[in-house]
Image (cartoon, coloured by chain):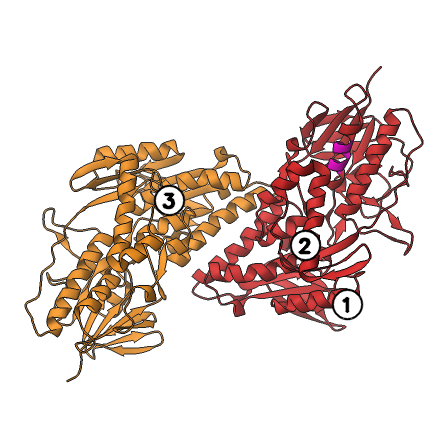
Chain colours: A orange, B red
Amino acid sequence: MKRPKIVVLGAGYGGLMTVTRLQKQLSNNEADIVLVNKNDYHYETTWLHEASAGTLHHDKVRYDISSVIDKSKVEFIQATALKVDHQAKKVQLDNGELSYDYLVISLGGASETFGIQGLDKYAFSISNVNAARQIREHIEYQFATYKVEAEKKSERLTIVVGGAGFTGIEFLGELGNRIPQLCKEYDIDQKLVRVVCVEAAPSALPGFDPELVKYAMANLEKKGIEFMIGTAIKEATPEGIIVAKGETETEEIKAATVVWAAGVRGNPIIEASEIENMRGRVKVEADLRAPGFTDLFVIGDCSLVINEAINRPYPPTAQIAMQQGELVAANITKLVKGDTNLNTFAFDNKGTVCSLGDDDAIGVVFGKKVTGTKASFMKKMVDNRALFMVGGIPLTMKKGKFNLL
Amino acid sequence: MKRPKIVVLGAGYGGLMTVTRLQKQLSNNEADIVLVNKNDYHYETTWLHEASAGTLHHDKVRYDISSVIDKSKVEFIQATALKVDHQAKKVQLDNGELSYDYLVISLGGASETFGIQGLDKYAFSISNVNAARQIREHIEYQFATYKVEAEKKSERLTIVVGGAGFTGIEFLGELGNRIPQLCKEYDIDQKLVRVVCVEAAPSALPGFDPELVKYAMANLEKKGIEFMIGTAIKEATPEGIIVAKGETETEEIKAATVVWAAGVRGNPIIEASEIENMRGRVKVEADLRAPGFTDLFVIGDCSLVINEAINRPYPPTAQIAMQQGELVAANITKLVKGDTNLNTFAFDNKGTVCSLGDDDAIGVVFGKKVTGTKASFMKKMVDNRALFMVGGIPLTMKKGKFNLL
């Protein structure tokens, strides 16, 4: 009897949770498990804003995949998945091809620029470790260059953050703490530095409790962050950005650094593989399979799960991806064992904490509002929990956040 | 009776030695001492190659001027000196004017590009703390960007060092140690990195013992440095450099980073002040006064002292500048006290050590050749001695190099 082959694409929160559960639930005789990932490491997407600001080294943000998989059960292939041929049950990789019996697409999202001109070319996106490192170095290089040039360009010391959503606000929190360090490092007067957040929506952190949003903005403003809320970016240019001002006018904000932190869409592989989707995201069935498929699961940023209470999709988060990973592992285990009565997914929202730098945060945890060092402590516990879920105590001890205030 | 006013321009090796000796030798009643410097800190010019490579933080390379001057005796003015009006006995500063009775010009040199096109625009020069920081950040930014870009530009990982003189070789030594760190930091295969040293003269380190030069080149080559000796840079461009190849041909070396470490000339103030000079350097009298002046001393990189043995100028080094500073302090003390029988300068060459990174060096010390860890140890002792001469044990303990192998 041939063992079924389970292929998991992507070693993010969802993918690693799937694989680490599968390797516990299935024996060597029951299935072959293959994990495909572009890098030989996993990175904490939700910590990338720290690596981008330079407040946390990127090696703290990633760990080797080999440290959490059971190599006697899981084969790891370092490759980029390009397309799924679901007819032939094969995945095209950049360095080969892979057949599967069950496929899990857990590839994470891509930046969504909503067609705003120049953003893809002139703005940075906090999308992975490589990008985070470049943002960190770009900002430092601007500060170093400002200090050298005879004719000072003040825009070198201006950073625009596009979007006051979760990622934008968390990045601003880190910048608020990082800027004084950078000014010290490069002998620059902090008054010369501008950090401007531009958000098209009428409020920062849409969906968050207004009282918490007010707290967050006030505390970030205390750290020197400027907000332009209800202001749309019309264009990104080599010199900075153009924003809308009133109905017809525009205004230029000169900035050497523009970071776009406003939109996420699904991975391009979804569209390339002609799976039914909305902006690269698949509205999955209750068992997390793509509609019309018996062998193809989609989780994480590429999946769309509706919050029935408000009839809108849940935002793609690490929390939901990990819960999906657990469920997919259970369902594939069932299928391998011949049980077609699959479990259905229900998101168990344990709350959300948005950090405002290492020392401050806001959040709703188990239905209760928290702010300040208490929220910051909880945020670190959330981060540590993700490590614990995948790699247990050893990984948590190695990569966890224990700089508790 | 009016106290004479002694003005010292520049807080480099020579200037600080002058001031710290003067403040010991003269009482408050005997003279007013003013020190003028662009920054409120002194930096170790001979350590800048380390800050530029990123192997030593620039804060280890500098210290506050206020920590070594006696504020009850010395007035410190932070300003850039532009021109000396020796007729009126005044110095023009960027923020005012200063009269003097005795003037010491100890301002350090400027980069000499010998008219090679594009060098001033496209090449970096290891000239001060600001420049060193920018070189460090520029190199890091190239590595970070290489990792992100879809179409890899290999020239981002190429560094050209123009000149295999003292500074060039010492910088290459640091790069040899730094490149493996950078490759680890940015997940880059070291085989992709090129460090090329281009030197027009027929040998590296002209004037050094050939056996030691051979040792240095072999050890740097082991660390991956390529040498193009006897090769002239014809031009620097935004893409890299053009070098001469044979009599008529040229060759392009694409490089995102070009560091020019080949030439030093005197400070522009010398020419601006119409003091007799050769490429900004003043061939000083035996008492270190500029020819024709009774009140104007020139020391350090702006001065030219002939080595009678070979009838060529001594290279401008920290060692000679400090010895000049001691002599100038003694001579001004004499003048203030009414003694016109001034001391004459004779350079006491204690030897020269050229570092090849933190862990290796070559040198001739008290007439004996040294290499390897022994030479490296001696180099650190030389560096510590400069600190001790100016700031005694406290400064040496604070900024000294004690990572002895």
**Residue A9, horizontal then vertical, whole percent:** 26, 68
Mark 3 = which residue? A161
Mark 1–mark 3 Cα distance, whole angstroms, equals 57 Å
**Residue A360, horizontal then vertical, whole percent:** 32, 37
How many numbered marks are there?
Answer: 3
Dot 2 lies on which element? helix
Tag in front: 3 or 2:
2
Tag in front: 1 or 3:
1
* Residue B377 tag number: 2
Residue extending furthest bottom?
A1
Instruction: Judge left or right: residue A56 versus residue A218.
Output: right
Tag in front: 1 or 2:
2
Q: Residues within 10 Å of mark 1 (few under 14, many from 20)?
A: few
* Residue B211 tag number: 1
Q: Does the magenta segment cover residue B317? A: no
Magenta span? B15-21
